[in-house]
Image (tube, rainbow, N blue to C red):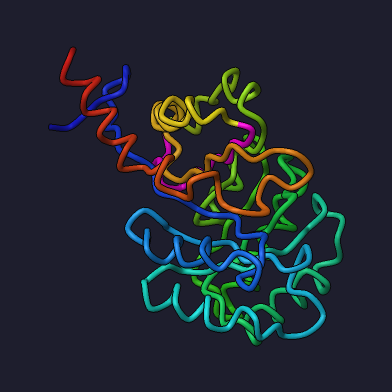
Amino acid sequence: MTRLASDRAPLAAPRLVVPAYFRPDFRPGDWESMADDSRDVRMVILNLANGPGTAPDPAFSAALSRLREAGVPVAGYVDTNYGRRPPRDVLADLDCFLRWYDVAGVCFDRVSVTAQDVGYYAALSRDARNAGVRVVLFNHGAHPVEAYAEHANMLGTFEGPWRAYLQLAVPRWARSRPANIFYHVVYSVPRENFDHAFLLAIRRRAGCVYITDRGGGNPYDCLPAGGLQPGSPRRAEHRLTGLMSRR
């Protein structure tokens, strides 16, 4: 049965894009979980030290190989400082990720939302693809002007705590685009509200999400309590099916 939003657009459970800002030698079970739950995981974002670090780290080799074997693409985390970081420095970080960790994608973080910076990011996206990147993610943390959607595979249009997510308004242009280009990150979510958070993401056309009960200075220092399964998109899909069947 196809489930529809109030405007008759099809609804589907989102997939996970996991910000893995933790080491496999410290959290081996979390890395194994991302591979085991590969059906739910669209991509893992690799972040060693707000970027690739200063040298290849052998501790990541086996964990990254396991993800590739499971069919989970990995993206390198690269900061852009809202368009203020020199492109050569941004691309140097990306080059390290490509050479040291053979990533398939890039997550450009702290991306501007304004029209005046679209050219900067269009050029970064073009250069990244020329370097061999297959997936480009712009993480804005809020909805940008629509022009950014022409230059990335995914746009991170929300990153914030649960209380703020409850108030999120989605602009009209975003509702006219495919859900699979939008990525929402919600932290400090009470465990009992995980299903609710996924349902809100579905209603807001976020085809990719990350929901965690973690908070503080780094909500991505490990997976949510209980791993990925308590907030699994499949649970949200079952919940959505139940809601729609009662209509």
Q: Position of residue 199 (x, y in %)?
A: 40, 28
Image quarter in which the C terminus is found: top left
Residues shaded magenta: 176-188
Q: Is residue 141 left or right of residue 71?
A: right
Magenta-drawn stretch contains 137: no
Name the residue located 71 percent from the left edge and 54 percent from the top edge: 109
In this view, which residue lies farthest toward the top? 247
Q: Is residue 182 magenta?
A: yes
Q: Is residue 131 above or below residue 31?
A: below
Q: Is residue 129 left or right of residue 221?
A: left
Residue 226 on image: x %, y %: 48, 46
Q: Quadrant of residue 70?
A: bottom left
Task: Name the spot of residue 79 as percent of width and height, x first.
Answer: 76, 60
Instruction: Identify the residue at horizontal 16%, vertical 20% (top origin).
Output: 245
- Give the position of the N terminus as an image quadrant: top left
Q: Is residue 121 above or below residue 215?
A: below
Dividing the picture into quarters, in which one does residue 179 lie?
top left
Q: Quadrant of residue 239?
A: top left
Who is closer to the viewer here, 217 or 14?
A: 217
Residue at 21% across, 28% down: 241
> Picture coordinates of residue 151 (x, y %)?
57, 56
Is residue 179 depicted above or below 78 in this figure?
A: above
Q: Residue at x 43, y 76 (%)?
A: 68
Depth check: 24 or 184 in front?
24
